[in-house]
Amino acid sequence: MTSTLRIAVSQEHGNAPVTVFHLKGEIDANTQTDLESKAEEVVGSGTQNLLLDLSEVTYMGSAGFRAIHAIAGKLGDEQSTTAIKSSHLKLLSPSAEVSKIIKTLGFDSYLDIYDDIDRAVNSF
Amino acid sequence: MESIPTSDAQLQILKQSKMFENAPKSLLTEIGGIATPVSVKADERIMEKGDKGTAMYIIIDGQVRIHDEDLTLKHLGKGDVFGEMAALDSEVRSASVTAEVDTILFQLEQNSVYDILSRRPDAAKAIIHLLCQREKSIVHDVTERSFKVRALERELEIGRDIQARFLPDSLPEVPGWEIAARLEPAREVAGDFYDAFHIRTINRIGLLVGDVCGKGVGASLFMTLFRSLIRATSLSGDFRGWTTSGAGLSGAQNGSDPNAIADRQTLEDSVTLTNNYVAWTHGNSSMFASVFFALLDPKTGSLVYINAGHEEPVIFGANGITQRLAPTGPVVGIFPNAEFKLGTVRLEPNDVLVVFTDGVTEAADVAGARYTEERLLDFFVSTPDRLPTTLISKIMTDIEAFSAGAQQFDDITLLAVRRTA
């Protein structure tokens, strides 16, 4: 059973430029490096705001959350002595199942989650 | 790939080829006669794994890479031969070959090779020589790799043994209580952990289950860190040789159980210190653990707990499931100064507390369907068993029956505690 993750990238413009990753598949130990390297790539070429569209993510394991924390760090939200909500990384439309895991792990206190792409893009 | 004229210099290279090192000049001339010299540009693909191939090649000049997608198996240079397996045996190509620099090759078609082989025993000898050389080199490579694999396996075995000692040798024996636990790692080393230990200064039983994100060696390194920090911080009074908690004096003044304050403080300090230590010191690693840590008062059955981003433990009794212990804070290790609230619950006689990791609920069958929390809860509702060791064994058996031989992809941990009286 090999998991796959497809990442389509689009650029949106709200109050600031926002890169959107449209993710499809599973984010787990197998695919988290794909997500991290893609994020590293766009951050390297100037992305400051990243929105992860999770609407077609069917499974997200703890390794996926590790990747999300690492990406938030790359976007410049790390090493504060107090954890605050990331202003550069946000999530869009997780499924009910993925939402439940986000809530269980407590990531909802540290990441803004939107259901509407326009509102999400304009929030940056 | 384009054809180019044959030159004397190219024929000279044939002589240097291992395949023809013992071949007479007349054979070299004949080979030169049937060979088509071709030139390939750097990065040009010469053959693709899985393609049907009818030609073999001798490198006259340049260098090629034998590979399977991104994995390079070998580099070959001047005088080396490749593609002979498919050419001689009409099989598909077993690997891909790409030129690393501009390269000149002698291309020998299967029909011409068979023709020479049927006429000239010295040609057959040259091919046998080549195949023997090839086999020798394969045996050498396989042996070398086996040694490396064995060395790595030994390292992993050592890691697994050392890690096993980070789990308790035995669980506390407490009158009126039965405690059992089990951890089945998915790989040689695990990211899950559990612990159960007596904190004498406050007379509480510490009950701990954790799950470090990811799996394998990385997760196992952090498992030792999380487990050690939680145990060390909660046992700090015992380590100092105290016999009662510092809070005992102030608590005793209002007549309540002095340890009822100390246990809350111990729990909160332990999880907060562990969280801040890992977040501040190892934050860059983005490694976190979901942790359920509880302190049980064996006299009263009262349980004070922190559920840090962990699967909700279950309490069930004679009338089915009575409680789920929902998260009281986020995962430990990445959110500095995160707030962890305390939960309290009381275990009544015959109540069973089961703490588990998501390796249980997410265990998959061959088709990828998951065991699910619903199935686990149904199990608790329907099982007549209450003895923790039996319960855990039966859950493990049920998971095995469900997965039906599918590979276990996450660590599975279960801790069960029953109040007998």
Image (spheres, coloured by chain):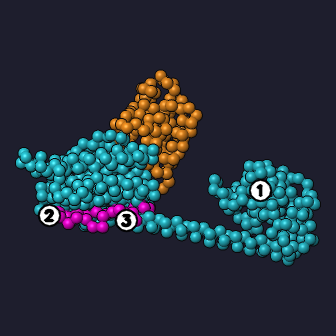
Chain colours: A orange, B cyan
Circle 3: residue type = Ala
The chain containing the residue under callout 3 comes to B
Name the residue rendered at 49%, 31% in the picture.
A49
The residue at which mark 3 appears reads as B164
Same chain for the residues under marks 1 and 2 in the image: yes
State how far apart marks 3 and 1 are (Cα): 49 Å
Circle 1: residue type = Gln
Q: Which residues are magenta?
A: B162-189
Q: State yes or no: residue B184 in magenta.
A: yes
Residue B161 visible in the snapshot: yes
Q: Is there a contact, CB below 8 Å, between mark 3 and mark 2?
A: no
Q: Which secondary structure is most common in the magenta stretch?
A: loop
State how far apart marks 1 and 2 are (Cα): 75 Å
The chain containing the residue under callout 1 comes to B
- x%, y% of residue B240? 24, 57
Closer to the camera, B354 or B161? B161
The chain containing the residue under callout 2 comes to B
Disc marking residue B63: 1
